[in-house]
Image (cartoon, helix red, strand yellow):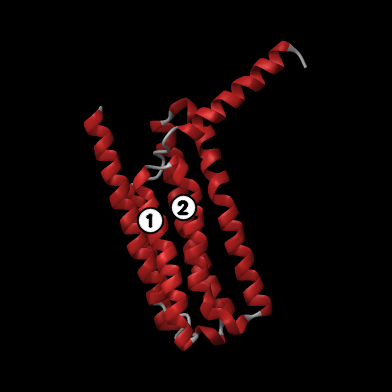
Amino acid sequence: MSDLEKAMMDLRTIRAQMARGTVFRGFGPTTLAATGFVALLAAVIQSLWLPEPEWTPLSYAGLWGLAGLLCAALIGVETVTRSHRLHSGLADDMLRAAIEQFLPAAVAGFLLTVVILRFASDQLWMLPGLWQVVFSLGVFSACRSLPAQMILVALFYLTSGIISFALLSFTETPAPWAMGGPFFVGQALAALLLQYAGDEDAEEE
């Protein structure tokens, strides 16, 4: 390895360490709040067209999967543009670090969904709680590079997921409120906390 290659590798390592040690400001409060309304819309659609989702598990999973993809797309587009505006030269490294932190939870949630649909579709009622718990683990993992207040969002989703398990176990039906309600409240909470963190930064500057 030449000195130039070694220097470039050291530089990449330093940039990655700086990215992991810098508070990530790529998530915008307005877009996070908007994803909460997407969850409410999906809940309304479920209540109108999928009143008994246990009989149409693929349609149920497809509805919420589509809602999740739409939310991810909204957040992704803004995060890229916002990161390059606020983090300039470190933007790509910070984006990569953010994806690496949340990706394991996203993959786990997808695989759990596939397994339940394929081998235990009669346990469909467990999906809302599972999705919320897995999402909370992703937020917990990402908290190391987010404003400290975001730990409250992770705790909220963990708590709401456990409550969903407890309540849905009585009916064994994935009710619309079990997803729409928690994700609307959770995303609104995330938006408020990010807005508060941004106001604090502005005051310090």
Question: Which residue is rendered at x = 55% and y = 39% of the image?
Answer: 96
Q: Is residue 195 above or below residue 173?
A: above
- Residue 138 lies, in percent from the top left, at 51, 54
Q: Are marks 2 and 1 in contact (CB under 8 Å)?
A: yes
- Residue 153 lies, in percent from the top left, at 38, 56
Crowd class of label 2 (few under 14; some 14 to 19; many from 20; radius 10 Å):
many
Q: As drawn, is 104 to the left or to the right of 33?
A: right
- Per the rendering, the mark at residue 119 is none
Extreme top residue here? Answer: 3
Identity of the amino acid at label 1?
Val
SS at badge 2: helix
**Label located before the other in sequence (2 or 1):** 2
- Residue 6 lies, in percent from the top left, at 70, 17
Quadrant assignment for the C terminus:
top left
- Per the rendering, the mark at residue 153 is 1
Identity of the amino acid at label 2?
Val
Q: Is residue 142 above or below residue 166?
A: above
SS at badge 1: helix
Q: Is residue 19 above or below residue 34?
A: above
Question: Which residue is rendered at x = 47% and y = 32% of the image?
Answer: 21
Q: Which residue is mark 2?
A: 139
Q: CA distance from mark 2 to mark 1?
A: 7 Å
